[in-house]
Amino acid sequence: MTDSADGSAATPLSAPDLATLQSHFVSILESVPDGMIVIDETGLILAFSKAAELLFGYTAKEIIGRNVRELMAGRDEINHDQYLRNYLDTGERRIIGIGRVVTARRSDGTLFTIDLKIGEAKIGDHWLFTAFVRDLTDQRRAEMRMREMQSELVHFSRLSAVGTMASALAHELNQPLTAVANYLEAGRDLLDLPGDDKREILREALDEGARQAVRAGDIVRKLRGYVSRGEIDARSVEIGPLLDDATALARMSMSSSDIPVVLRIAPDVGWVLADPIQVQQVVINLVRNAQEALASTASPKIQIGAQLGANGLVAISICDNGPGLDPDVKNTLFKPFTTSKSGGMGLGLSICQTIVEAHGGTICADLAPDGGTCFRFTLRSDPAIHTS
């Protein structure tokens, strides 16, 4: 027993009655900082907090009793009831207890991005689900601006590097190509002169021209080898968080961010030797390609997996259930300037291949088990982590 503020003995708390619990619940709905929505197992809204009213533009009186899918957008709105039934039937979690970023709809129809977390409770034979909603609009706007600034900086750096490289290449090639032109012109002039002794001079001019042409080819080959070889800052990186971050970055920059992405990391994978920025670039590129391929698919999904492979390698896969690969494109998929996109340059997969091979791995594409496309690439596992 404790003392009250005035020094008198306080009465021990007994089990609260229904009215007390209801009053406490109402106070929570009025004061909880994030939007809080309670629904039943059929998706009908039972409670709507003050913060949720400000967030969605509905009053609790207006929205209670309506289906929660009215607050959703895209495929989540279409498939919500199926997700709910699937969870109640199988226990498979899509959001419950996990949370993810989704697109929501306000009362005026405008869309905005939210962080959604859901808890569950079984009361008797019935289920209640409580959703906690946080508006990410300002955060996403700041992140997008930061990425735009970083992209502009990278673009400027690339333009500067390309300009420097073009200038150096022009300087290096100018001398041998000028020599080739001069020898050819001299040879042409020698053809107009009489005498057998000019034939030997002509042969020498053509030999020198050929030598200078070979020199120009060597310059180009060395440049190509330098660019394609690249440099990597390989270090020990945990593969799970790396793939998770890359997936989030890919989703944030795509309009089809509501496509379900399932990430399955085998528990024994652990760590790889990699340059995380470059590997994330590979994953982002492949996830974006999958999202674009799924534009006309009714129930799209992307699965990202990682598991231990042979010879100390970790195998990573990005699979979709889209229309699959065109056989005519498959054989030239990783060649530069090969693309099926009207506005694409065809360099994305070529760059992915360069990065993966610089890490000592390989990359390929084939049909996914459910008929879509599956890109697979390998990275070296960190033996120090796996043997410690």
Image: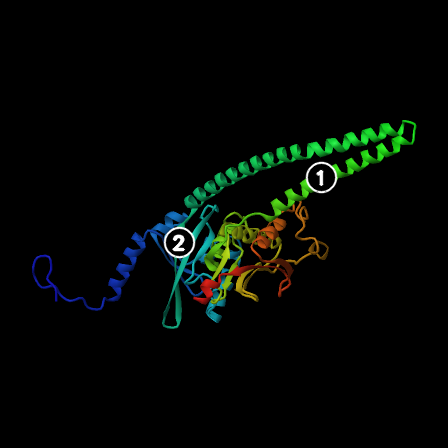
Secondary structure state at the residue bearing disc 1: helix
* Residue 86: x %, y % from top left: 50, 67
x and y percentages locating residue 325 in the rendered image: 67, 57
Q: In this image, 125 relative to 30: left or right?
A: right
Front residue (pair 108, 306): 306
Is residue 193 shown above or below 149?
above
Q: Which residue is mark 2?
A: 133
Left or right of 333 in this view: 257 = left
Sooner in the amino-acid sequence: mark 1 or mark 2: 2
Q: Quadrant of the C terminus?
A: bottom left
Residue 137 percent coordinates (x, y) = 43, 45
Q: Which residue is mark 1?
A: 215
* Residue ID at (71%, 39%): 215
Count of marks, rendered view: 2
Callout 2: few (<14), some (14-19), or many (20+) C-alpha neighbours within 10 Å?
A: many
For the question of whether residue 197 can be seen, the reply is: yes
Q: Is residue 343 visible?
A: no
Residue farthest to the front, as pictured: 197
Above or below, 33 relative to 12: above
* Front: mark 1 or 2: 1
Front position in the image: 201 or 53: 201
- Residue 95 drawn above or below residue 350: below
Q: Quadrant of residue 194?
A: top right
x and y percentages locating residue 312 in the rendered image: 54, 64
Find residue 100 and name its label. Answer: none
The amino acid at mark 2 is Val
Left or right: where 199 falls relative to 235: right
